[in-house]
Structure formats: C-alpha cells, structure tokens
Image (cartoon, rainbow, N blue to C red):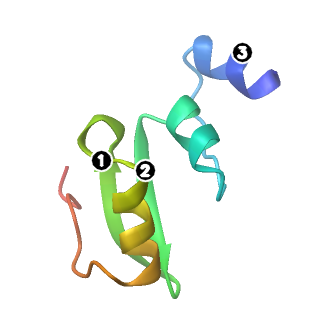
Amino acid sequence: NIIRTLKDNGEPLILISHNMRQVFDLCDRIVVFRRGRIVANLRKENTDGQDIVSYSTGAKTGEAELAA
C-alpha cells in the first residue's frame, strides 16, 4: 500500500475518506467538515468513530480542539 509506505516513512499526508477504519489506521489527526466548515480537529487518541459521526451529522456542535 503506497499510503502506508509514505506514512511509515514519515511523509505528511492528507487523506480524505469516509472509511473510519482507514482513517483511524492511517491518521494521527482527524479533521471533520460539515457543510464546508471545519467542526472538529481531533487527535486520534482522543476520539472514536461515534464521536466523528456525531460531528459530521451535526449531532455534536461547536468546534472541538481547533487550537490543538
């Protein structure tokens, strides 16, 4: 997998995906957009798939960890 090799070599990557397994496997930070705006910028270790879905659907509102 080219993406895995790049990550393992320390290359910075931007991954756009709805596949939560892939996102949690490859990303250190997760940025959630809703209606063209950032609603969450989270560290992988501080969140889970349900949290991400809540932000993306609007069930959770406000900007999370944007200063992090």
The image quarter in which residue 3 lies: top right
Q: Which residue is mark 2?
A: 30
Q: Looking at this view, is 59 or 4 the one in front?
A: 59
Task: Give the residue at the far bottom of this rendering.
Answer: 35
Q: Which residue is mark 3?
A: 5
Q: CA distance from mark 2 to mark 1?
A: 9 Å
Residue 29, compared with residue 50, is above or below; it is above
Task: Give the residue at the far front of this rendering.
Answer: 50
Determine the residue positioned at 51% across, 88% down.
Answer: 35
Q: Amino acid at mark 1?
A: Thr
Residue 16, compared with residue 23, is above or below; it is below
Sequence-earlier tag: 3 or 1 = 3
User: Residue 16: x, y in percent?
Assistant: 65, 55
Q: Amino acid at mark 2?
A: Ile
Q: Amino acid at mark 3?
A: Thr
Q: What kind of element bears circle 3?
A: helix
Circle 3 crowding by C-alpha within 10 Å: few under 14, some 14–19, many from 20: few
Task: Give the residue at the far top of this rendering.
Answer: 9
Q: Is residue 13 left or right of residue 6?
A: left
Q: CA distance from mark 3 to mark 2?
A: 19 Å
Q: Mark 2 and 1 residues: CB-CB less than 8 Å, in contact?
A: yes
Q: What kind of element bears circle 1?
A: loop
User: Residue 1: x, y in percent?
Assistant: 81, 21
Determine the residue positioned at 40% across, 43% down.
Answer: 29
Q: Looking at this view, is 1 or 51 the one in front?
A: 51
Q: Nearer the viewer, mark 3 or mark 1?
A: 1
Q: Which residue is mark 1?
A: 47
Circle 1 crowding by C-alpha within 10 Å: few under 14, some 14–19, many from 20: few
